Amino acid sequence: MLLTKCLPLICLSLLTLCTGRPLYPLPGQGTKSFKLQTSRPYNIAHRGSNGEIPEETAAAYLRAIEEGTDFIETDILSSKDGVLICFHDVILDQTTNVASLKEFADRKRTYEVQGFNITGFYTFDFTLKELKTLRTNQRYSFRDQQYNGKYPIITFEEFIAIARDAPRVVGIYPEIKNPVLMNQHVKWPGGKRFEDKVVETLKKYGYGGAYLSKKWLRKPLFIQSFAPTSLVYISDLIDSPKVLLIDDVTMPTQDTNQTYAEITSDTYFSYIKQYVVGIGPWKDTIVPVTSNYMQAPTDLVKRAHAHNLQVHPYTYRNENTYLHFNFSQDPYNEYEYWINVIGVDGLFTDFTGSLHNYQEWTSPLTDTSKSPRHLLGQIASLVLPYSKA
Ligand SMILES: *[C@@H]1O[C@H](CO)[C@@H](O)[C@H](O)[C@H]1NC(C)=O
Ligand SMILES: *[C@@H]1O[C@H](CO)[C@@H](O)[C@H](O)[C@H]1NC(C)=O
Ligand SMILES: *[C@@H]1O[C@H](CO)[C@@H](O)[C@H](O)[C@H]1NC(C)=O
């Protein structure tokens, strides 16, 4: 009886295997629900699975969900007409085809951004309609170029729809990007600020609730920013957990012009923990690097934990270019070190699939191993050798 009921499902699983679509175990998929796992460090898909597919596109986010991410991460900027979009750079040059389009040749501008004059095509000089005519490209030449020119820029609302349509609970991790610049160049009705628009959009889709509250677990969300004043400002507007990003040691904060030493001091942690649940530092500032070898770790993670702050460092990348020599060119060694030696609470990765596989092998989710889907996967793997390659 049970078996006959299961048979169509088994065939379905085999079909996905035979068509070459990998069958990934989904995190947190127990017998009761498809909930977010909270027992191991968070897998945060940095700009989607951008190691494989152009960053911040629907395709990159869908891939990350398929690969087992806990959170899809995005950077929020604005169009000229005040629509929030998912895009990393303030200029469109690096990851779109804007420079090749004659109709926009006169849009190039120079503005001062965090103390540097930068020339390019700025997102806020284009209406959403115009932005939608652009196509995205892979940022790095050593990554797969086959998707160049295929995918459009998406809006923040479209991004939220992707998380909501996922077949299990997938959290979102939006960054309030360059708020100083956005508020300088974009005007919203009623004198609203960029930060107001971000929070308004989140609330429109039912986001809110303190970390690990029932409401939060249904729609998990971390709000991140490099600008502490933006996080403090929105603390009155939404109770969702917030994370202060921390830049390289040479970079002052964009809004308060504070140094790395200032914002990583115990005094500052005592202050900022009233507003945030964690920090998101650049990983090479936690474990400094010389000649591509890692030095002794700083006490940053220990001190942050002593203040009950989570630590979600960025960015983990599989490629040789980014792996320090200590890891023997093996990204799993890198995850092992950061999760088990340093003890971080979340990881921003360009390769969600790799982090997910590493975690499934080293700390499988117990309820998942008993789930019907897992059982089906096991049966499928037994039958697979006998099916056509
Ligand atoms: C940027 O350019 C403007 C105009 O040429 C100049 O006044 C300003 O000092 C420049 N800023 C920087 C940081 O170089
Ligand atoms: C930021 O602070 C540094 C000192 O840390 C100072 O030299 C610089 O002028 C300040 N910049 C602004 C824009 O206030
Ligand atoms: C990385 O390798 C270097 C050179 O062998 C060694 O000195 C250093 O301690 C290693 N770093 C870590 C964090 O293991």
Image (tube, rainbow, N blue to C red):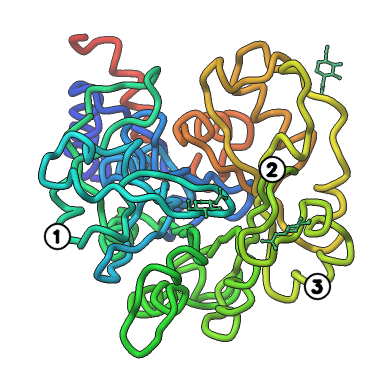
Location of residue 316 (image quadrant): top right
Amino acid carrying mark 3 in the image: Tyr
Task: Give whichever of discs 3 and 1 has the lower sequence position.
Answer: 1
Residue drawn where x is 14% and y is 39% of the image: 101
Task: Give whichever of discs 2 and 3 has the lower sequence position.
Answer: 2
Q: CA distance from mark 3 to mark 1?
A: 42 Å
Query: Residue 147: image x %, image y %?
Result: 22, 29
Q: Nearer the viewer, mark 3 or mark 1?
A: 1
Q: Is there CB contact under 8 Å for labels 2 and 3?
A: no
For disc 2, the marked residue is 248
Residue 10 is left or right of residue 251, and the answer is left
Residue drawn where x is 51% and y is 54% of the image: 113
The residue closer to the viewer here, 298 or 42, is: 298
| Figure quadrant, ligand 3 | top right
Residue 187 is left or right of residue 42, and the answer is left
For disc 3, the marked residue is 271
Query: Residue 87: image x %, image y %?
Result: 36, 50
State whether label 1 is within 8 Å of ligand 1: no
Q: Is there CB contact under 8 Å for labels 1 and 2?
A: no
State whether label 2 is within 8 Å of ligand 2: no
Amino acid carrying mark 1 in the image: Lys
For disc 1, the marked residue is 129
Task: Give whichever of discs 1 and 2 has the lower sequence position.
Answer: 1
Residue drawn where x is 43% and y is 66% of the image: 182
Q: Residue furthest bottom?
A: 190
Q: CA distance from mark 2 to mark 3?
A: 21 Å
Residue drawn where x is 53% and y is 28% of the image: 317
Location of residue 76 (image quadrant): bottom left
For label 3, the crowd category at 10 Å Cα-Cα, with few meaning under 14, some 14 to 19 and many 20 or more, is: few
Q: Is there CB contact under 8 Å for labels 3 and 1?
A: no
Element at label 2: loop
